[in-house]
Amino acid sequence: MEMKIALLAGDGIGPEVMAQAVKVVDAVAKKFGHNISYTEGKVGATAIDHTGLPYPEETHQVCLDADAILFGAIGDPKYDNDPKAKVRPEQGLLLMRKMLGLFSNVRPTFTFPSLLHKSPLKRERIEGTDLVFLRELTGGIYFGEPRGRNEQGTVAFDTCVYSVEEIERLARMGFDFAMKRRKHLTCVDKANVLATSRLWRETVQRLAPEYPEVTVEYEFVDAVAMRLVQWPKAYDVLITENLFGDILTDEASVISGSMGLMPSASLGTVNKLFEPIHGSYPQAAGKDIANPLAMVLSAAMMFEYAFGMQDEADAISDAVNSSLEHGVVTEDISEGGKAYKTSEVGDWLATKVLAKEPAQ
């Protein structure tokens, strides 16, 4: 199969972890007989430095021309430490999601048997955890108008706005996910306080009879925040709005023991983007010490969600699990054993993918 993949490495450790994902994708292509072409695009701080914009038009065109997008990370301390900066790397991420119509962020949370002891939660609470958040990405308080400050600069305001159409398209995706999993859907809102949350709940309640096999629960966001650390295995598929999803998915990510292990997908009607959940980690940039596994697992999600290739996705996931079992990991999870370089982990994973016979 011919595949065109856009590479948006971004800032900090983004280029380093992206390079490892490309090694593994190339190994999969060689094993399964695919032809892959890559086109790079600038985004985030590096794009600002070169063009003045965090998501320039030429990068947008690269994304539109691709079958799938691999995205690294964005962020730079020179912008983080300047609250008055007019242009910020994160603006590029929001703009990219909006322009590409990436309305659903798919964030799985699962555990690795060899790393259960790394989690801040007790083994009996997390063993067997396998949940997925669908976070609405292009609406809510991050995009609502009006926003800003009063003339005196003493009052700031942001507006949370949602339409039935925005809620329904995410909810239907959530129901579809639930049907393919354990048929359990949780709608996360704050319907006791917020009008937008009441619209979320009403919309999901209207759709629920179309999916009679799915058990639907409605929980307030604060209750979910507590239950995620008390009993994460209670959840299967969770759907929620932009701000709530931003916070809860980061909370859920540490269940596995490291934010450097969790992948994600941002899906639209046409375009599909895949990225690790971690940030740009500028302190580690250029040192060849960053954990590339989340980026590599994001490539596995790309094969599954963008191309429908489960065998290819499984080949990557199996290689990652094997690297964890054999201790071929970077210093953040090496636990006093040998700490491999970022590039060494990528080389090992690519070799592992090629060494295993493809499924028949």
Image: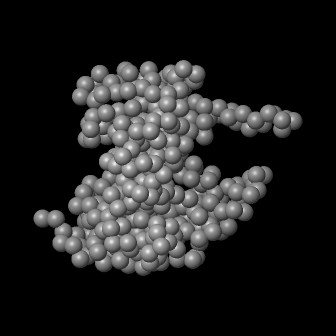
Q: Position of residue 142 (x, y in %)?
A: 60, 40
Q: Residue furthest left?
A: 360
Q: Is residue 145 left or right of residue 63?
A: right
Q: Quadrant of the C terminus?
A: bottom left
Q: Against 67, is 222 above or below? A: above
Q: Position of residue 313 (x, y in %)?
A: 29, 60
Q: Position of residue 136 (x, y in %)?
A: 48, 39
Q: Against 171, is 195 above or below? A: above
Q: Quadrant of residue 345?
A: bottom left
Going 31% across and 33% down the picture, which residue do you hit?
Answer: 184
Q: Quadrant of the N terminus?
A: bottom left
In-front residue for pair 179/86: 179
Going 40% across and 39% down the picture, which residue do you hit?
Answer: 231
Q: Is residue 284 left or right of residue 182?
A: right
Going 29% across and 75% down the picture, which residue do you hit?
Answer: 352
Q: Position of residue 77 (x, y in %)?
A: 69, 62
Label count reads: 0
